[in-house]
Image: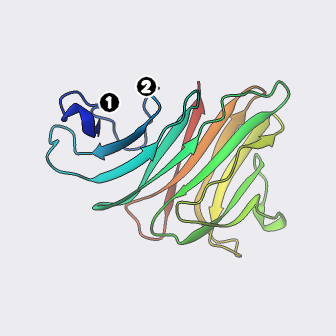
Amino acid sequence: MLHTTGDEFADPLFSGLEFGTHSGEVSMQPDEINLNITPAGNPGSFLAEETVQLSDSQRYTLYLSGLPGQLDGVLATAGSRRLATHAKFRYYQGAARFSAVDLYVVPAASDISLLSPLLSSVPYTGMSGYLSLEPDMYDIVLTWPGTKTVVAGPLRVDLAARGVYETISADSQQTDVAQLLYFEID
């Protein structure tokens, strides 16, 4: 559950949000607010607490990542402006077991051994800005920095003109493998 301090935990902003999903949008007044993340049905047990400053007329995305008991929150502005001829793509490195990764976004079925990463050595909780990509089918792949050793992917995605997309890496049950979460933003 996600609560703000002022509501005394009566009405959560989001309830029962499962891992790997994202919430809908909520309108809030511009202010400094304290967000409390709790397990569903247990508002007395804090998983994380974040204080954020919200500005007027701005959209935000709050990323929560990390291992149980060690969640980190990163607040980022959301880019809602669409591009008529390109897709907008953003990546958040939320896999806590990986201090850094290289990100490949390559034409579908490409051999990454012949290519360079789109982003190199993205640290844990690091995030790209919105990148403009040609509309096409792509594979998203993560490797250990400076190597071709795959730790996640390939994840095949179809990026369309006027689309806004986000990919988030997260820890998996295996310590040497990450998972990729992919969202098309409405």
Mark on residue 26? 2
Q: Residue at x 80, y 41 (%)?
A: 133
**Image x and y of residue 164, in percent:** 67, 32
Instruction: Return the residue found at the far bottom.
Output: 146
Category of crowding for the residue at label 1, using alpha-carbon neighbours closer than 10 angstroms: few (below 14), some (14–19), many (at least 20): some
SS class of the residue under badge 1? loop
Answer above or below: position of 75 versus 177.
above
Split into 4 quadrants, where in the image is the C terminus?
A: top right
In this view, the residue in front, 134 or 155, is: 134
Quadrant assignment, res 137? top right
* Amino acid type for the residue under numbered disc 2: Val
Q: Which residue is mark 1?
A: 13
* Amino acid type for the residue under numbered disc 1: Leu
Q: Residue at x 83, y 24 (%)?
A: 84
Q: Residue at x 18, y 35 (%)?
A: 8
Q: Is residue 110 left or right of residue 185?
A: right
**Image x and y of residue 118, in percent:** 77, 58
Identify the mark nearer the N-term, 1 or 2: 1
In this view, the residue in front, 81 or 185, is: 81
Quadrant assignment, res 142? bottom right
**Image x and y of residue 135, in percent:** 81, 33
**Image x and y of residue 106, in percent:** 77, 51
Q: Residue at x 43, y 25 (%)?
A: 26
Mark on residue 81? none
